[in-house]
Image: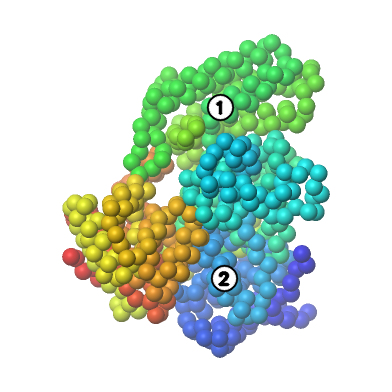
């Protein structure tokens, strides 16, 4: 696609950034106010801080409160800079909800296009689990009565099954958003997952994932992805090049991290290694079917035997974690010794593979697949065997048990692979600092030099918001109070739960009651469809455990936010590792996480100058005694305790 012109003129004797500054000034002082947009000092201050970051190719933490219009600011700079440099800007968002706010009808990009007369080439780069997997869907459709699955199967284009179809007749398909009726639970059964071996899949060139990837790579202005996807791009870039594949994302002019305070966890997640008992067995069983030496066969049998016994011990020595799908593993010396033995024998097999490939006729491509998986397996084991470098847990699905290995620290890799690039990096969020100090976030991401600023929200919270505090003594009493509060506002509410289990308990209680409004639950449908229904049905209630940030619902649809409990992190292996290495774990990990989440949750209520409403915060008596003063310091208005 041909790149589009910069929306202002730059003569040969003029400097791009001087003209950019003039244009941005015209936009915020003249063009937007003429179209009914409010002139905000905070927005203009942020604009000229960002200009310096783009001009000097700096990393900047742009902490801007709700309502400052920060998204319009970074979009304007990113689009102009992308056209100036001839490379797309990448906007990395915390999750799909935030992406939806940018690209939906009347969303931020749509508003910018209409206000400035621009035509922005924006394309979405979604993580692989957002696409249907034909290798899972096709056989499942032949043996299930699940209407959701069968309907998706019916909507797959004909060319996917027609191996004679020409490439130019292919069209994009398979995006999770195209099937809004599918619940999260059903989607997991038909979507890509980490156990799929795409490189050897017969559907590979006709998969929705492949076709969508080919499309977004040609964006000229903006590519929008999630933090998870951006980190997957970073970690796989070199290995994909070695294998003759293109990196997941093209070279960019700049990167904006929206809700950038969540990047560290995405980085850890992106470096995560997942192992499944069946996958190693399948890979090595296939190898045994080739022409290989007897010595190699004995080695494979040893590895499979140890692996079976090891996974059995992992299952026996793991315990469930409340509020998390992760099971904590208690590694015994015997289990560590077995992991060392596995690591040693896999290394030996990698060496044997070279000899077998030279002695026998084994297809090069097949050798590469086996080698790639064994190296992957070996590296994960090496992290596990190093003292204090990894975080480990088990995850159970309907069909398998997975061992997950995650590196504890990612700052060194980020410093080398991301922030060494000589391009602007923009972090945007209302919650980047701890009491004005950005060093905690910078250190965790390996950022040594940065600029920063903070601007407060322009909203009059004293006039627009009330906050009530409650002591949670009995769950039934609390649920009943929820019912009263929802009835008083005629629905129009968001209920935020700390865990999926807590939301499930409320759902069971509410199922026996009759309310004069719809109650929607996160996970019942594709998330943007759930949010659309919530916004279009003014009296609806939305129950969620993951929408503490990113949800932007101004107007009558949201007049009340009920926070069911203080959102502390779970006691799972990831946060236990953080606690273990913190000087003051309760303060640095638990309280810091809770306060950040609480600030984000409260920020869902007031999204415009016309909004008003009430926040209800529930907590235990001991939590009030411990955290009341700390919580009240970060709230925009005084709490009225009930």
Question: Residue 450 location, x and y as percent?
Answer: 53, 62
Whether 53 is drawn above or below 45: the answer is above
Residue occupied by mark 1: 278
Horizontally, residue 104 falls left or right of residue 533, namely: right
Whether 317 is drawn above or below 19: the answer is above
Question: Residue 354 location, x and y as percent?
Answer: 73, 22
Question: Residue 148 location, x and y as percent?
Answer: 53, 48
Horizontally, residue 194 falls left or right of residue 173, namely: left
Q: Quadrant of the C terminus?
A: bottom left
Name the residue at 59% across, 24% down.
281
Name the residue at 68% across, 63% down.
88
Question: Crowding at label 2, few (<14), some or many (≥20) Cα neighbours within 10 Å?
Answer: few
Marks 2 and 1, how far apart at CA: 44 Å
Question: Crowding at label 1, few (<14), some or many (≥20) Cα neighbours within 10 Å?
Answer: some
Image disc number at residue 315? none
Label 1 element class: helix
Residue occupied by mark 2: 105
Question: Residue 58 location, x and y as percent?
Answer: 59, 64
Horizontally, residue 215 falls left or right of residue 620, namely: right
Q: Can residue 629 be seen by looking at this rendering?
A: no
Q: Can residue 300 be seen by looking at this rendering?
A: yes
């Amino acid at each position: 696609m041909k790149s589009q012109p910069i929306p202002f003129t730059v003569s040969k004797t003029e400097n791009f950034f001087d003209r950019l500054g003039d244009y941005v000034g015209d936009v915020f002082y003249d063009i937007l106010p003429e179209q009914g947009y409010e002139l905000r000092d905070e927005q203009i201050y942020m604009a000229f801080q960002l200009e310096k970051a783009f001009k000097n190719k700096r990393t900047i933490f742009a902490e801007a409160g709700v309502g400052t219009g920060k998204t319009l600011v970074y979009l304007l700079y990113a689009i102009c800079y992308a056209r100036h440099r001839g490379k797309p800007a990448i906007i990395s968002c915390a999750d799909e909800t935030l992406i939806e706010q940018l690209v939906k009808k009347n969303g931020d990009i749509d508003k910018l296009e209409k206000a400035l007369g621009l035509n922005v080439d924006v394309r979405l780069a979604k993580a692989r689990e957002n696409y249907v997997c034909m290798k899972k869907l096709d056989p499942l459709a032949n043996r299930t009565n699940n209407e959701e699955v069968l309907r998706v199967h019916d909507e797959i284009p004909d060319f996917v099954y027609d191996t004679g179809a020409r490439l130019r007749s292919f069209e994009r398909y398979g995006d999770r958003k195209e099937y809004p009726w599918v619940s999260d639970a059903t989607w997991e059964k038909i979507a890509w997952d980490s156990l799929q071996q795409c490189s050897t899949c017969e559907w590979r060139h006709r998969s929705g994932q492949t076709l969508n990837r080919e499309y977004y790579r040609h964006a000229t202005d903006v590519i929008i992805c999630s933090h998870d996807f951006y980190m997957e791009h970073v970690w796989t870039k070199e290995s994909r090049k070695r294998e003759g594949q293109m990196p997941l994302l093209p070279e960019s002019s700049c990167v904006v991290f929206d809700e950038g305070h969540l990047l560290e966890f995405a980085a850890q997640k992106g470096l995560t290694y997942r192992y499944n008992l069946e996958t190693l067995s399948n890979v090595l069983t296939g190898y045994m079917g080739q022409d290989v030496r007897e010595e190699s066969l004995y080695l494979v049998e040893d590895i499979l035997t140890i692996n079976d016994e090891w996974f059995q011990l992992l299952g026996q020595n793991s315990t469930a974690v409340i509020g998390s799908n992760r099971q904590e593993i208690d590694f015994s010396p015997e289990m560590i010794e077995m992991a060392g033995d596995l690591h040693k024998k896999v290394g030996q097999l990698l060496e044997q593979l070279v000899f077998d490939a030279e002695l026998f006729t084994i297809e090069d491509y097949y050798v590469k697949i086996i080698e790639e998986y064994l190296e992957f397996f070996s590296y994960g084991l090496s992290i596990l065997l190093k003292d204090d470098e990894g975080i480990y847990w088990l995850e159970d699905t309907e069909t398998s048990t997975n061992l997950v290995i995650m590196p504890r620290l990612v700052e060194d890799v980020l410093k080398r692979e991301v922030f060494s690039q000589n391009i602007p990096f923009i972090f945007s969020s209302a919650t980047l600092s701890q009491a004005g100090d950005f060093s905690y976030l910078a250190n965790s991401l390996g950022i040594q030099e940065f600029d920063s600023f903070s601007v407060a929200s322009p909203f009059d919270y004293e006039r627009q918001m009330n906050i009530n505090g409650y002591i949670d003594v009995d769950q039934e009493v609390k649920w009943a109070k929820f019912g009263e509060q929802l009835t008083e506002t005629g629905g129009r509410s968001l209920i935020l739960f700390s865990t999926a289990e807590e939301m499930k308990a409320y759902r069971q209680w509410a199922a026996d009651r009759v309310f004069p409004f719809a109650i929607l639950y996160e996970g019942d449908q594709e998330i943007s469809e759930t949010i659309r229904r919530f916004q279009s049905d003014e009296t609806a209630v939305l129950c969620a455990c993951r929408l503490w940030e990113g949800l932007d619902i101004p107007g009558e649809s949201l007049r009340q936010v009920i926070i069911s409990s203080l959102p502390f992190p779970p006691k799972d292996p990831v946060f236990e590792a953080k606690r273990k290495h913190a000087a003051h774990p309760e303060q640095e990990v638990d309280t810091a996480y809770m306060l950040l989440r609480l600030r984000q949750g409260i920020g869902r209520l007031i999204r415009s100058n016309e909004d008003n409403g009430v926040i209800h915060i529930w907590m235990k008596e001991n939590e009030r005694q411990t955290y009341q003063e700390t919580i009240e310091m970060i709230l925009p208005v005084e709490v009225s305790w009930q």
